[in-house]
Image (cartoon, helix red, strand yellow):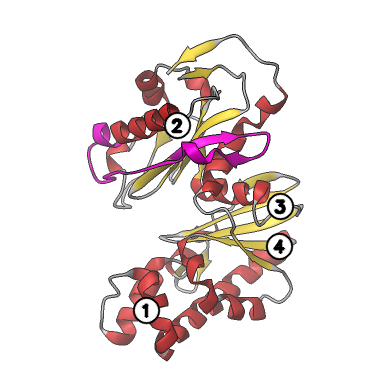
Amino acid sequence: MQINSLSTSFILTADIGGSHITAGICHLESYSILTQSITRIEVDSKGPAESILARWESAFEQVLQKNITASVSGLSIAMPGPFDYEKGISYIKGLDKYEALYGMDIKQHLAELLSIDPGVIRFRNDAESTIAGEVLSGAGRNYRRVMGITLGTGLGSAFTENAVTKDLNLGSNPYRETIADDYLSTRWFLRRYLELTGVTLKGGVKELAELAPGSAMARDLFIEFANNMSDFLSGPIAQYGPEVLVVCGNIAKASQFFLPQLTKRLNSIPIKLARLGENAPLIGAAAMFDDLNHTEPSSSVTKL
């Protein structure tokens, strides 16, 4: 398989999670992922840099081996921060993941590893990628101004206006005695459940959702979470004036327990759940190559 230098509408794209990498091929003209190309493999994010990068390379190789018909024109990666997305340098530290990559020029390393030009490798914030994907072909489609949030290990956020999506980093904004990230994330549920019961919630929000049908306390926790979210988001919503709020991330899988309360309190704006799942960040990251949609084919080829 080959990467053609800026010549086709197919992009090799990946999403870097805390314990895995998901990769596939995105068709830019339809903003869709080729189903047969999707590959998901586990990664020890606490391991050495060589091991992490080898797993990433393995995912890329597997995707390209599955894909028979399309040549790809670049590599896009949805990456958690802190990260220099333009230069491709990781500054992740103190987050219990990928610390071995700190200060590394990942773009150059991948270019050498895969024998491709660094110019065909692009990085994008993972939350921004997810929300961009939902705007392009998911829950945010057909809206001009979209605010999106991702609810998981942290609070991700982005705002789209006229098809341009930018990271908002709302999770770092002050909220109560600390920051929003501490109240709108999995760790808030774990901390609050421990405070109320003295028990560690080992299965995270998924376990809490399983308890909720038979537990008033669990249901009340989701209501409290919705109240926190509405209190915090009311300011940014007033500031940016979105037409819709799109809710993404793993916590959104338990939306039946908090969405009615959130909708009630944020009654000035429609709220939609993400539709694309893991495909959203793959599409959003690949969209950084949108300039290729109107580029004449090139005969220049770089072999992977």
Kindly identify which residue carries mark 4: 244
Residue 105 visible in the displayed image: no
Question: Looking at the image, is mark 2 or mark 4 earlier in the sequence?
Answer: 2
Decide: marks 2, 1 in contact (CB < 8 A)?
no
- Judge the density around disc 3: few (<14), some (14-19), many (≥20) Cα neighbours within 10 Å: some
Residue 150 spot, x, y in % from top left: 52, 59
Q: Is residue 144 left or right of residue 225?
A: right
Question: Looking at the image, is mark 4 or mark 3 earlier in the sequence?
Answer: 3
Distance of label 1 from label 3 (alpha carbons):
35 Å
Kindly identify which residue carries mark 3: 141
Q: For residue 214, what is the image quadrant?
A: bottom left
- Judge the density around disc 4: few (<14), some (14-19), many (≥20) Cα neighbours within 10 Å: many
Q: Is residue 39 above or below residue 156?
A: above
Decide: marks 3, 2 in contact (CB < 8 A)?
no
Residue 45 belongs to the span the image colors magenta: yes
Magenta highlight range: 23-52
Kindly identify which residue carries mark 2: 88
Question: Looking at the image, is mark 1 or mark 3 earlier in the sequence?
Answer: 3
Q: Is residue 121 left or right of residue 208?
A: right
As drawn, the label of residue 192 is 1
Distance of label 4 from label 1 (alpha carbons):
29 Å
Q: Which numbered disc, 4 or 3, marks the residue closer to the eye?
A: 3
Question: Looking at the image, is mark 3 or mark 2 earlier in the sequence?
Answer: 2
Per the image, label 2 sits on a secondary structure element best described as loop
Residue 188 spot, x, y in % from top left: 40, 71
Quadrant in which the N terminus is drawn: top left
Decide: marks 4, 3 in contact (CB < 8 A)?
no
User: Could you say which is closer to the camera, residue 112 or residue 89?
Assistant: 112
Which residue shows up at 62% across the image and 22% down it? 8
Distance of label 2 from label 4 (alpha carbons):
32 Å
Q: Amino acid at mark 4?
A: Val
